[in-house]
Amino acid sequence: MPASASLSGLLWRRPAWRVAALISLPAIWFVLFYLAALAAMFVSSFHTVDELSGQIQPGWTLDNFRQLLGDWTYGRIALRTVGIAAAVTLTDGLLAWPFAYVMARYAGPRLRPALMALVMLPLWSSYLARVYAWRLILAHDGALNWLLHGLGLPAASIGYSNWAMWIVFTYLWLPFMILPLFAALERIPPSLLEASSDLGAAGWRTFRRVIVPLAMPGLVAGSIFTFSLTLGDYITPLLVGGPGSDFIGNVVYSNVGVSNNIPFAAAFAVLPLLVMAGYLLIARKLGAFDAL
Amino acid sequence: MRQSSEPAPLIRLSGVRKVFGGTAAIENLDLAIHAGEFFTFLGPSGSGKTTTLRIIAGFELPDAGTVALDGQDLSRLPPHKRDVNTVFQDYALFPHLTLLENVAYGLRAKKIPAKDAILRAEAALASVRLADFGARRPGQLSGGQRQRVALARAIVNRPRVLLLDEPLGALDLKLRHQMQVELKALQQQTGITFIYVTHDQDEALTMSDRIAVFNHGRVEQIASPWMLYEQPQTAFVAGFVGITNIIARDGTACALRPEKIRLLSPDAPAAGWETMPATIAAVSYLGMSTRFLLDCADGSRLTAVEQNMAHGAEAPRLAQGSPVLAAWSAEAPWPLAA
């Protein structure tokens, strides 16, 4: 076959076709399974369920949203979800800094892969197994209180509470903060830090004026992970949160499963979407994506 | 070659040693640099010149020895406590700050009020002909412009010493020549002591008051450009600064510069000259001059360079294979240290 008739020759001559061939599959995936599903969810949030038959009644009504806003229980659940997601993001941000910084700046060619493996190690085991492990650690007769007792300290009763959820979520999503932050820090040329110091800035000033602004895209990327992953979770609240520590996800889950009220679940699920959209807009306004 | 009658030096390095991974980058280095000098560290890569500069800046701690600025030891001070500033090889401009913010960075770090800092930064940008660029970011500039911003950012702090680490390395030849002239003018205007690192001998000769030639972590010679070229102390200096022939005279190795060799007809009278019959082995036309490779009667090889005078009238005589008489005056060969 002459070169001009071959597929590779054709794609070589027409770069636009090459791009199209590469992007079509993920694009179809994205549109069908992601955007279409989101749209379906959004539309169904305006539907209702017939109380007698349990059948979904199509139509355009704000009943679901009225019910959400009218009952303060849902407000508390939303606030708890967003509040813990924010607390987890903040804590992970603080914990990730020193670790990512050591990895990016000080770790040599042998230490760095070792630290990387340490970060990734938890992701090799099942999420459920790890949350159950924490349940055992934090339980009243668990490892934490056993340790506190051994040290002669009073027992902590943080099992099945918001504190427990905060600790477990912080642990779960920490790798998702460390990795993007590490990548951002690693990209800062060392000469910039030397230049800052050369121009008379002590360590703290260099950190605030050079390192933090340049690491911001990584920090924002990490915070999007930790925030949205916490926002959408319902298993950790189920396993380590106590009674009355429901997340939005738990309400959605029970309305889909137990009450069979999918339109109401969809309506509540719109909230995390709006929160994330707002978060991304603010991040963009602060210039977090300027370096992308 | 160190003058002892001079006043106390501004910068004095004594017995400085720096080891990287078991290899000494600098070995027992002594240097004295005077106020207002344009002083150059010249040497091949890995000769220790950049390490020495980084020790003066404070980016590296010496393993032994001291660095004194105006008699005060600063070898244990962090960079931000030293009254020296650096122009980095990659310029190291802050990409997230405007040019004005970049230039004002050092002033703000020294707690100079924002208003004064901005005025001084604007003046500094104007002095490198970038007055209208203050609101731009480094990413929007050409290499030459970035280089000038880096210079302004260092100069605006009026340091006692300005350290320049191959600042022109990334520029093309024409711009480099232009910047060499500008740098020298800037140094004379400001009176700031410049310490300049380069591996480019032309650059070193063009700008420097004195040059220290580095080789394998040691200084081979410290001298003015003229002395370095005309009276090199070692074979390394003779070979690194310009092209040279090493000839043996009375059992001593001597440096003989190619342009000091005249090419005469084999039968020309050459009384008072030292001579060597030779054949032309190769001719390279270089525009301004022509370079000849000579096979000498005693089996050695010499390089000779002749200016191309009016219309190259002599060219036919000096074609490849022609016999010539290489001649030089008795003072031309400079004896090297053993």
Image (cartoon, rainbow, N blue to C red):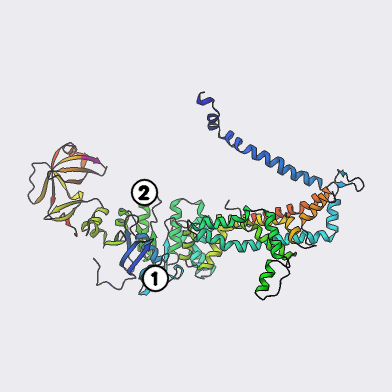
Q: Is residue B289 magenta?
A: yes
Mark 1 residue type: Ser
Identify the residue under disc 1: B75
Q: Residue at 36% across / 72% down in the picture?
A: B68
Q: Residue at 31% across / 67% down in the picture?
A: B28
Q: Is residue B319 magenta?
A: no
Q: Position of residue A129 (x, y in %)?
A: 68, 56
Sequence-wise first label, 1 or 2: 1
Q: Position of residue B105 (x, y in %)?
A: 50, 64
Determine if residue B318 is in view: yes
**Which quarter of the figure has residue A97?**
bottom right
Q: Which residues are magenta?
A: B282-290
Of helix, strand and loop, which one carries label 2? helix
Badge 2, how many Cα within 10 Å: few under 14, some, many 20+? few
Badge 1, how many Cα within 10 Å: few under 14, some, many 20+? many
Q: CA distance from mark 1 to mark 2?
A: 36 Å
Identify the residue under disc 2: B173
Side of B214 where A249 appears, left or right: right
Q: Position of residue B62 (x, y in %)?
A: 38, 67
What secondary structure predominates along the stretch shown in magenta? strand
Side of A87 where A18 appears, left or right: left
